Amino acid sequence: MPSSQHNAEVPISAFNAEQIDLMYGLEPVYEPGSEHRECPISVWLEVCCPHCWRSYGSEFELGHSTQQRIEDCPNCCGAIELTFEPEDEDGHYRLGVERAY
Ligand SMILES: [Zn+2]
Protein backbone atom coordinates (compact mmCIF):
# COMPACT_ATOMS: atom_id res chain seq x y z
CA MET A 1 0.00 0.00 0.00
CA PRO A 2 1.53 3.35 -1.01
CA SER A 3 2.00 5.97 1.64
CA SER A 4 3.15 9.57 1.28
CA GLN A 5 3.98 9.80 4.95
CA HIS A 6 7.59 9.55 6.02
CA ASN A 7 8.83 8.35 9.31
CA ALA A 8 10.51 11.17 11.17
CA GLU A 9 13.06 8.81 12.70
CA VAL A 10 16.23 8.14 10.80
CA PRO A 11 16.20 4.52 9.79
CA ILE A 12 19.11 2.48 11.13
CA SER A 13 19.94 1.47 7.58
CA ALA A 14 21.06 5.07 6.94
CA PHE A 15 24.27 4.15 8.74
CA ASN A 16 26.49 1.40 7.59
CA ALA A 17 27.77 -1.22 9.97
CA GLU A 18 31.23 0.31 10.19
CA GLN A 19 29.87 3.66 11.30
CA ILE A 20 27.72 2.01 13.91
CA ASP A 21 30.69 0.06 15.18
CA LEU A 22 32.73 3.26 15.44
CA MET A 23 29.93 5.11 17.20
CA TYR A 24 29.29 2.46 19.78
CA GLY A 25 32.61 0.67 19.88
CA LEU A 26 30.93 -2.65 19.25
CA GLU A 27 32.34 -5.84 17.93
CA PRO A 28 31.60 -6.49 14.28
CA VAL A 29 27.95 -7.24 13.79
CA TYR A 30 27.16 -10.88 14.17
CA GLU A 31 25.31 -12.15 11.15
CA PRO A 32 22.75 -14.76 12.04
CA GLY A 33 22.61 -17.38 9.37
CA SER A 34 26.29 -17.21 8.53
CA GLU A 35 26.81 -20.18 10.79
CA HIS A 36 24.75 -23.22 10.02
CA ARG A 37 23.33 -24.84 13.10
CA GLU A 38 21.22 -27.94 13.31
CA CYS A 39 18.33 -27.47 15.65
CA PRO A 40 16.02 -30.41 16.10
CA ILE A 41 12.48 -29.54 15.20
CA SER A 42 9.71 -31.75 16.36
CA VAL A 43 6.03 -31.82 15.62
CA TRP A 44 3.22 -32.91 17.85
CA LEU A 45 0.80 -35.03 15.88
CA GLU A 46 -2.50 -36.56 16.70
CA VAL A 47 -2.43 -40.31 16.35
CA CYS A 48 -5.66 -42.21 15.95
CA CYS A 49 -5.33 -45.56 17.66
CA PRO A 50 -6.18 -48.44 15.31
CA HIS A 51 -7.36 -50.51 18.26
CA CYS A 52 -9.80 -48.26 20.10
CA TRP A 53 -10.08 -45.42 17.53
CA ARG A 54 -9.41 -42.81 20.13
CA SER A 55 -6.72 -40.24 19.43
CA TYR A 56 -3.77 -39.11 21.46
CA GLY A 57 -0.82 -36.81 20.93
CA SER A 58 2.63 -38.06 20.01
CA GLU A 59 5.84 -36.23 19.21
CA PHE A 60 7.94 -36.78 16.11
CA GLU A 61 11.25 -35.28 15.14
CA LEU A 62 11.51 -33.68 11.73
CA GLY A 63 14.66 -35.32 10.51
CA HIS A 64 15.88 -36.46 7.15
CA SER A 65 15.01 -40.08 7.45
CA THR A 66 11.98 -42.22 8.06
CA GLN A 67 11.33 -43.01 11.69
CA GLN A 68 9.60 -46.12 12.81
CA ARG A 69 8.63 -46.97 16.34
CA ILE A 70 6.16 -48.98 18.31
CA GLU A 71 4.35 -47.44 21.21
CA ASP A 72 1.41 -48.31 23.37
CA CYS A 73 -1.87 -46.49 23.11
CA PRO A 74 -2.40 -44.52 26.34
CA ASN A 75 -6.10 -45.29 26.13
CA CYS A 76 -6.24 -49.04 25.52
CA CYS A 77 -2.55 -50.06 25.81
CA GLY A 78 -2.66 -51.57 22.33
CA ALA A 79 0.65 -51.67 20.49
CA ILE A 80 0.80 -49.26 17.58
CA GLU A 81 3.42 -49.14 14.87
CA LEU A 82 4.11 -45.60 13.78
CA THR A 83 5.96 -44.76 10.60
CA PHE A 84 6.86 -41.12 10.21
CA GLU A 85 8.14 -39.98 6.84
CA PRO A 86 9.44 -36.44 6.70
CA GLU A 87 9.50 -34.70 3.35
CA ASP A 88 11.61 -31.68 4.02
CA GLU A 89 11.42 -29.83 0.71
CA ASP A 90 7.80 -28.80 1.08
CA GLY A 91 7.65 -29.26 4.80
CA HIS A 92 5.07 -31.98 4.40
CA TYR A 93 5.19 -35.23 6.27
CA ARG A 94 3.31 -38.47 6.37
CA LEU A 95 2.38 -40.57 9.32
CA GLY A 96 1.51 -44.21 8.97
CA VAL A 97 -0.39 -45.85 11.82
CA GLU A 98 -0.75 -49.62 12.00
CA ARG A 99 -1.52 -52.23 14.57
CA ALA A 100 1.54 -53.91 15.97
CA TYR A 101 0.95 -57.10 17.85
ZN1 LIG B 1 -6.15 -47.44 21.75
Image: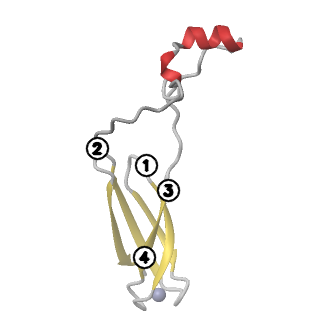
Identify the residue shown where x is 33% and y is 39%: 3
x and y percentages locating residue 85 in the rendered image:
34, 58
Identify the residue shown where x is 65% and y is 7%: 22
Instruction: Give the side of residue 7 with respect to residue 22, left or right.
Output: left
N-terminal label among 1 and 4: 4
Distance between the alpha carbons at the discs numbered 3 and 1: 8 Å
N-terminal label among 2 and 3: 2
Distance between the alpha carbons at the discs numbered 2 and 4: 44 Å
Tell me how the rendering is colored. Answer: secondary structure
The residue that mark 4 highlights is: 47
Q: Amino acid at mark 3?
A: Ser
x and y percentages locating residue 14 in the rendered image:
49, 17
Circle 3 packing at 10 Å, graded few (<14), some (14-19), many (20+), is few
Total numbered badges shown on the rendered structure: 4
Distance between the alpha carbons at the discs numbered 1 and 4: 19 Å
Q: Nearer the viewer, residue 26 or 56?
A: 26
Q: Amino acid at mark 2?
A: Met
x and y percentages locating residue 83 in the rendered image:
37, 65
N-terminal label among 2 and 1: 2
Q: Are marks 2 and 4 in contact (CB under 8 Å)?
A: no
Circle 4 packing at 10 Å, graded few (<14), some (14-19), many (20+), is some
Please tell me whether mark 2 or mark 1 is closer to you in this view.
Answer: 2
The residue that mark 1 highlights is: 63
Distance between the alpha carbons at the discs numbered 2 and 1: 40 Å
Label 3 SS: strand
